[in-house]
Amino acid sequence: MLDFEKMAYVISKFPEQRVQVVGDVVLDEYLIGRAERLSREAPIPVLELVERKTIPGGAANPAMNVKALGGETGLVGLVGDDDAGRELIAQLRAAELDASGIITDGARRTTQKTRIIAQETSRFPQQLARLDRVDRFPPTEKIAAEIVLQVKIAAPVSSAVLLSDYRNGMLTRSLVEAAITACREAGNLLIVDSQGELDKYRGCDVIRANDRDVSAYLRRPLRTESDFETATAELLDMLDTHGIVIGRGADGVSLRGRRTPYHHFPAANPSEVFDVTGAGDTSVAVLALGIVSRLNLAEAAFLANLAAGLVVRKLGNATVSPDELRAEVASNEQ
């Protein structure tokens, strides 16, 4: 049984928690234009630029979600010595988010994802294309030592450390091992939002992965509810973890913990999906805040599922407010 009253109450306790995010930070750029005509050069619309905006993305997005929900947070990540990196840091500081753990690496460029958006007055904006600028090589030994130092500084003063892996090279196996050691010494939780490479996260407290990556790791398709139930049980032992959460997109979320039996929650908002960008980041941010606020794994995952259902109604990397989340809890209780 889910305790809806407890979930609503816990949202008010989020400001007492600090979740330190470590991972691949990104500057998300949106070029929004109005389609005026078709190009003579190719079968594509010609857009007249209306607006350019940038938003902290990648590992910065779960940190922004923690901040929006009232929690304390900070970031450990890598940027290049370039305009995109300076713009990203400026935006994080403007959001009053602790960016002291962001390290500038002159040998790499800041990861930037540019989305081309067509805006029509008669319908929702539509994403036409995305251009990524990214370096995926691992950090040098010197830079890696700086990252580890920042993790060691952050872990003892945080309720949890959240590793956000976008597979951009920063979260090496040795860095993950250092994070595990730092969190164990500090006696706090280490939560992972992975994108494959699940072996790398063996020993972390809670691991979130999507269904495709779990299927690839187990080397078999996951189609039925029985498949997911079996997979979560196997992963607990294979990855030596206390909790497994599998994001299943439009099919919701499945989970199992050492003290939590298998649960599956359908997607919270299947009929009003506008943009799925960043839904996983919102989900894992709420999952982390819920767990450190003393929700059990099922309650935290349910709350995270509701939050993801809210952000898919918004354009781009978005956040949810405590009031929005409380209202969603109340509507599901009825």
Image (tube, grey):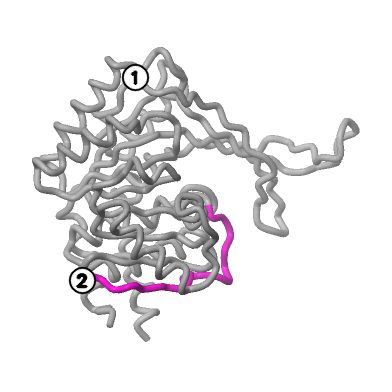
Distance from Cα at disc 1 to Cα at disc 2: 40 Å
Q: Residue at x 15, y 44 (%)?
A: 158
Label 2 crowding class (10 Å Cα cut-off): few <14, some 14-19, many 20+?
Answer: few
How many labels were placed on the picture?
2
Judge by depth and name the residue closer to the eye, 318 or 287. Answer: 287
The reply to whether residue 275 is in sight is yes
The stretch in magenta equals 260-276
Q: Nearer the viewer, mark 1 or mark 2?
A: 1
Indicate the position of residue 137 as horizontal and vertical percent values.
Answer: 44, 22
Judge by depth and name the residue closer to the eye, 310 or 242. Answer: 242
Q: Residue at x 34, y 72 (%)?
A: 262
Query: Which type of secondary structure does the marked residue at label 2 adopt?
Result: helix
Indicate the position of residue 75 as horizontal and vertical percent values.
Answer: 28, 36
The reply to whether residue 72 is in sight is no
Judge left or right: residue 262 versus residue 84.
left
Judge left or right: residue 155 versus residue 69.
left
**Badge number at residue 252:** none
Query: Which residue does the numbered mark 1 point to in the structure image?
Result: 104
Q: Earlier in the sequence, mark 1 or mark 2?
A: 2
Indicate the position of residue 300 as horizontal and vertical percent values.
Answer: 29, 65
Q: Is residue 112 above or below residue 83?
A: below
Q: Residue at x 47, y 33 (%)?
A: 27
Using the rendered view, name the quadrant where residue 44 is placed: top right
Is the C terminus in the top left, top right, bottom left or bottom right quadrant? bottom left
Badge 2 amino acid: Tyr
Query: Which type of secondary structure does the marked residue at label 1 adopt?
Result: strand
